[in-house]
Structure formats: C-alpha cells, structure tokens
Image: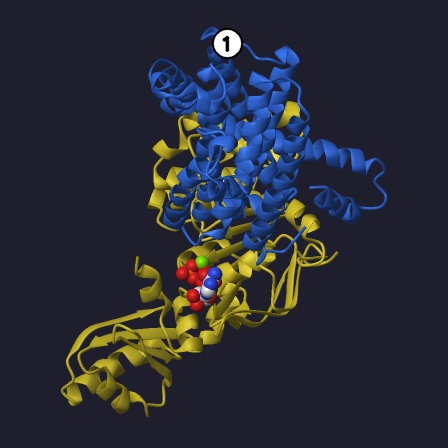
Chain colours: A yellow, B blue
Amino acid sequence: MSPAIETVALRKTFGDNVAIDALDLSVERGDVFGLLGPNGAGKTTTIRMLTTLLAPDSGAARVCGFDVSAQPSEVRQRIGYVMQRVAYRGLLTGRECVEIEAALYHLPRREIPVLAEAALDAVGMLPHADRRWTTYSGGMQKRLDLACGLLHSPEVLVLDEPSLGLDVQSRHNVWEFVADRRLGGATILLATNYLDEADRLCNKVAIIDHGRVVVQGSPSELKRSVGADVVEVATREPERLRRVIETERWVKKIVIGELGDLHIFVEDAAVALPAVMRIGLEHGIGLERVTYSQPSLDDVFLLHTGRELREVAMAP
Amino acid sequence: MTVEQIEEKQSAPADSPGSGAGTRRQYAQEVLALARRWWIELLRERLNLVFSLAQPAIWLVFFGAGVERAIDTKVIGTDDYIGFMLAGIVTFTIVGNGVSGAMPLLWDKETGYLDRLMSMPIARSSVIVSRFVFQVAQQSAQILLVVLVALALGVRIATGPFGMLVILLTAALLTMSVTAAFSALAYAVPQHGTFFAVAGFVSLPLLFMSNAFVPLEAMPVWMEVVARLNPLTYAIEAMRTLVLNGWEPRVAASLAVLLFAGAICLALGTWQFRKQTGERVRG
Ligand SMILES: Nc1ncnc2c1ncn2[C@@H]1O[C@H](COP(=O)(O)OP(=O)(O)OP(=O)(O)O)[C@@H](O)[C@H]1O
Ligand SMILES: [Mg+2]
C-alpha cells in the first residue's frame, strides 16, 4: 500500500522567501507523525500544500497515493484538516456547524444527525452542542474544529498545532483524541511547537527548520542519537565556562541556548556534574544552577540546529 | 459551474457507474448545506431581517405620501408616482443587498473559513452559487412584499399577474449581476476596509446615474448617455414599463441588455474567485 503521505523535493517560495526547500517526508499508514519546528519553519506551509490549499512550486506531494496537484479531489476526500487558526463560523451553534460540514462531506442525509452527535461526543462537546459556537472558550472552539475534522472518518487526519493555547485539561483531551483516532486506524500528521506533546503522541517525528528536514526518526531514536545525558548550567559567563571545559575528555558537545544556558552533552552525568562544579570553582565562575536530564527532543533540536526550540515555543 | 462538474466527473473513478448523477446530487447537497448556513444566519440576525424586509416598503410609503407632492407629473410622464417609483425602489434595494450580500463571502475569506471549505471535497463554485441562490430567494421575497405594498397603495400593474412574475424575473437577473459584481469586489480587495470604501463610493452614483428618479427622456443628453451605460437603467426601464405601460418591445430589449450585463458580472465574479483561490490547487 502506498504511504499515507509522501513528499519528494517539495518546494514553495513566497517571493524571495523560500518557505519550503526540498522537503522529503514519508509517513506510513497508522503513524502519528510529528512535524516539529520553530515559528516560521514551514509547518503550516507544508500542511497547506498537503491539503491542496497551496500549489507547490516544484516537487511532488502525494496523500494516500494521490498527487495533490493532479488529483486534488481524491486527496480532499481522504483528509480531515484542523487549521491552526480556529475557523470562524458566524452565528451557528456547535451542532449546526458540524451538521453543515457533514453535508459538505456528502454524508448520507439521514445519518447526519447521528454522525454529528457522535463526532461532538468524541470531543466531549455534546453538552454544549446547542449553544452558539461564539460563546465557547478557545479550547472548546478548538475541539469543535476537531469534531468537524473527523466527521467523515478520514484516512489521514492533519492537525496544525491542535493544542495551541489550550490549558492542561484541554490539551489532555486533545491527546486522548489523537490516541483514539490512532487506535481507529487513522494516520495523523501533527504539527506542533510542543516537544513534550510530540514525545508523548508521535511514533515518528521530523524536525524542520527553514523549510528543510533537519532530522527525523522515532522520538527515542532521536534522543539516543544525542548521547547519554545532558547537563544544563546557568551562569553569567557562559562563554568563559565553555572555553575552560571544552577540552575535558567527558564532553561530547557544548551548545549555548538562547537564554545563555550551557547545554553540555556528556557520556555520563555522574562524572560530569562534580567535574563541572569543580572547574567552575577553580576558575571563579559563578554557577547559578546546575541540572542534568535525560535528553529530550529539545536537546535533539538544539544539537542539530544550534538553537533552542523551547524558548521559541514558550513565546506567545 | 458546469466546468467544475465536468472536472469532477473526469476525476471520478471510471468503475463507478452513475457517478455523474451522484455528482449532481452531491452538488445539490453542497449548495443546500451552504445555503442553510446563510439561512440560519439571516434568521438569527432578526433586527437585520426586519429592517431589510421593511425598508423598501417604507421607502415606497415615504415617496408616495411625501415626495409625490413635489413632483411635476409632466416630467415623469404619469400620474401614478408610486407606480413610477416602484422600479427605482426595487433597484435601490437590490444594490443595497448586493453590498451586504457579499459581506459573508468577505468574512469567510478574511477569517480563513474559505480555506476550510476549500480543503473539503466540494465543487469550488458551490460556495458562490449557494450565495447567489440565497440572495435571489431573499431578494424575491422582499420584492414581492414591496409590490404588494404598492398594490395596497393603489398601484395597478398594467401587465397583470404575469407581468408581476416578469418583474420578479427582472429583479432576479439584476440581483445576479449586482451580487456577482460585489462578490468580485469582495474577493479582489486586500481587506474589508477597501471593500466598504469602494462599495460606498459606487453605490449612490450608480443609483443617481440611472433613471431611478428621472426618466431618460427628461435628462440632459450627457446624463442620458451615462445612464444608458448603467445596467440598472435597463432593469428599471423593463420593470417600469411593465407596471405603467404594458407589454412593449423595449421590455425584451432591456432584458437582453440585462442578461448581457449579468454575464459580464458573472464572468468577473468567477474570475476574481478563481484568482483568490488561485494559489490553491484547482479541482
Ligand atoms: N501567504 C504567505 N505569503 C508570504 N509568506 C508566507 C505566506 N505563508 C507563509 N509565509 C512564510 O513562509 C514561512 C513559513 O511559514 P509557516 O506558516 O509555514 O510557518 P510555521 O512553521 O507554520 O510557523 P508557526 O509555528 O508560527 O505556525 C514564513 O517565513 C512565513 O513568513
Ligand atoms: Mg503554523
């Protein structure tokens, strides 16, 4: 069977701005595939091409084996798309929104009320179904969008930052929703800025930056590729500290994050931690905080791009 | 819309017999679903509904009771001033509704819901067509009401009930052109401020540079020339003749011109819609 999503040397420019540059992705059926990257990396642009909203400049993109440019209606029938921005739906109630979109997906007229209820129920919105959607909170509006995206049981569900701006409770609802869809056999493409989300939900991730895949694989593979442990040091003099410990045998790589924290990739934190403190003391470099962690996807991103995703993602 | 349907037929799998009929049924389902959306919104905006329904009737009463006394009946060529104004007021309403009718399309474009729609397996044209169908239906109800008010005020339509039907048809034709033109504008502008600026700028001159208030015969030559280039003039001429005079050949001539103008506006609307969705993949 053809992969759920496949792009080959996909490219899209806006004037001089190369948004997507030779992007190669392959998403197998049943995957929950995470598209990670900082703001402006090209996640939404990629998704807009995959959902036939934007014509690629060159290269090819196929969804369930159908080319997005040549067979757009085949593609549209097979995808459910939840946009990054909540869709504006006028004065309708939640139920009306869902029923109207169900009709637009050509579901049989008689079954629409039942299917609409089921979709609303799946996202926990049934109790609020008959209120105007404008009276919903941001998280509820997002869940309404999710309900609309799964109405026609799409083979591929495309979610653009589904938990953007949600509270912990609503994020967990979204995560459960994704896990349920996956059990139902759907393929899910999920763009996100939240690494913990990707770590938790995805069996494969691709980190993209400047419109290119920086690295891809399963979250555990990627984390293993970082090395054993990461020691993080907060100090006023990151550059000086870097210079004095760079030459140590146990150091694999050092990157300075955007907040000025030192991320030291090491074989074994048990050796590195006391050593860092000793060296700091010897050179009179004040250390404000020293922590160590198992590598996270954050560290993967940092290692491959020299930039930190976390700060970018935390910014509103 | 026929082009879209053909495209869809071609892309439908060859082994599904009767997919043509299915496509037509699907198309109807799409248009109805989208029209349902407009319909619900209309009902929810009660104030808007009341005002837009009552406004033309109020105009008619206002003109009948007040302005009539200030008018020289020799200039307008008839004693029946309300009958004379009826066509103008119908046209007035159509232009007003053309502006407000394009607004939902503008919002869909600006808020991104158009994108959501375009990611669905629907024919592109159903978005516009649903709006047209809806506008014409709403407009017809409104015009029927005005005509009934006019009848109550003593106007007698020279061509009888069948003439009334043709009046509605004429209004529908004009509604199509005006809706298409303002939809084109809605899709063409970078943002809604421009839309309102342009729409406000063109609506009034469009009305005053027609025979809505003054018959062509009474105009200075330059004004008559301008009015003759204005599609509204032909709608008014057709409707006014049907009300005041009876079946005359110029009704057919005016309808022909209107049809032509409608085709141009429709082409314009389609062109702008396609341009707006042009970055997107056709289908
Ligand atoms: N319609 C457009 N016109 C011009 N430039 C655009 C357009 N859409 C996107 N871009 C540019 O393309 C690049 C990628 O944008 P994109 O929206 O895909 O980023 P993203 O990864 O989704 O970011 P975010 O996390 O902020 O949603 C950015 O540099 C953006 O400015
Ligand atoms: Mg985005």
Residue at the image position 77 percent from the left and 49 percent from the top: B11
Residue A36 seen in this snapshot = no
Residue drawn at point x = 68 percent, y = 48 percent: A73
Give the secondary structure at mark 1.
Answer: helix
Location of residue A94 with respect to B73 vertically, above or below:
below
* Residue toward you, B100 or A234: B100
- The quadrant of the picture occupied by the N terminus of chain A is bottom right
Q: Is residue B240 above or below residue A200?
A: above
Which quarter shows the C terminus of chain A? bottom left
Measured from the top left, where is residue B68 in percent x and y?
Answer: 38, 17
Q: Is residue B130 left or right of residue A108?
A: left
Residue drawn where x is 41% and y is 66% of the image: A38
Name the quadrant containing residue B165.
top right
Using the image as rendered, state which of residue A60 and residue A169 is in the foreground. A60
Q: Which residue is mark 1?
A: B151
Q: Position of residue B51 (x, y in %)?
A: 38, 22
Chain letter of the residue beneath label 1 in the structure image: B
